[in-house]
Image (cartoon, grey):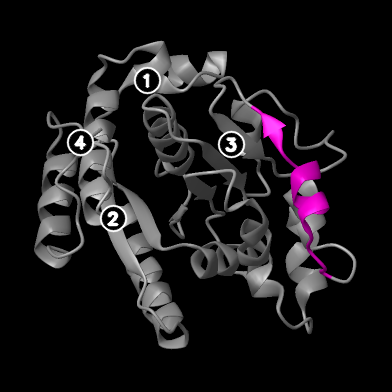
Amino acid sequence: MQVWAVANQKGGVGKTTTVVTLAGLLAEVGYRVLLIDLDPHGSLTSYFGYDPDELDNSVYDLFAGDGAVDAALVNSLLKSSSHEKITLIPASTALATLERKAVGQEGMGLQIAKALRHVRQQYDFVLIDSPPVLGVLMVNALAACQQLLVPVQTEFLALKGLERMVRTINMINRARQRKLSFTIIPTFYDRRTQASVQSLRELHNRYAENISSAVIPVDTKFRNASIKGLVPSSMDSGSRGVHAYARLLRSLMEAVDAEVVV
């Protein structure tokens, strides 16, 4: 089972779009995909028609009580999505209180990793949507994953956010036995604007070893898919955005020596 986290310490860079589009592409070639929403805003949860304010069971339950995690608990959190191969563990707004409650509690950074041990046989891929804040939820995502995906909007303020994220990755790597690999994904690219072109050039100059060759363009088809709660590839498999994510996915699959060619 491959676990990929999507994270950046800046909001509005395309994290949820990255999660749902990659999930759809994986699902459509037969992989069983689990999505985990760790963002208190619940964008991924809302995408598939669930209300983070109304859910009785959510990922928050993995952090509640004494922190014990068993298979029954994990399976009780699983929700269906608009795609038969994609399952969701949703977020609730209660996640916003977690930082305060987690103070002084040991092991809270490993709850997601513990939960995933119970579903290893059920899923081929897990994609985690992380909050744009360094805290216990992002730490959980980074601790659980084998690959980190960092979407970065191609504009200069987003580059500053990336600097913070890279510092966080370096900090996490000092505590990990195995170095965390990360891929920077340029998003919201508009080749008609000087800001996008210059920002992409700067990303290549600064992060040549980690930047994806796939560049995600501005594409209104993503918005149309989100309105209907569908993964973008099932809404319009020929869109520019889906093609860009398919190219990204091929490179990621090559990196993990996948046997199936996407």
| Image side of residue 209 versus residue 6, left or right | left
Q: Quadrant of residue 87?
A: top right
For label 4, the SS is helix
Amino acid type at circle 2 is Val
Residue position marked by numbered label 3 in the rendering: 44
Say which label, 4 or 1, has the lower sequence index. 1
- The residue beneath circle 2 is 256
Residue drawn where x is 74% and y is 56% of the image: 96
Which element type, helix, strand or loop, lies under badge 2? loop
At label 1, counting other C-alpha atoms closer than 10 Å, the crowd grade (few under 14, some 14-19, many 20 or more) is many
Please state the extent of the stretch shown in magenta in the rendering: 67-80
CA gap between label 4 and label 1 equals: 13 Å
Q: Secondary structure at mark 1?
A: helix
Q: Is residue 186 above or below residue 191?
A: below
Q: Which residue is mark 1?
A: 233
**Which of the two discs, 3 and 1, labels the residue nearer the N terminus?**
3
Q: CA distance from mark 1 to mark 2?
A: 22 Å
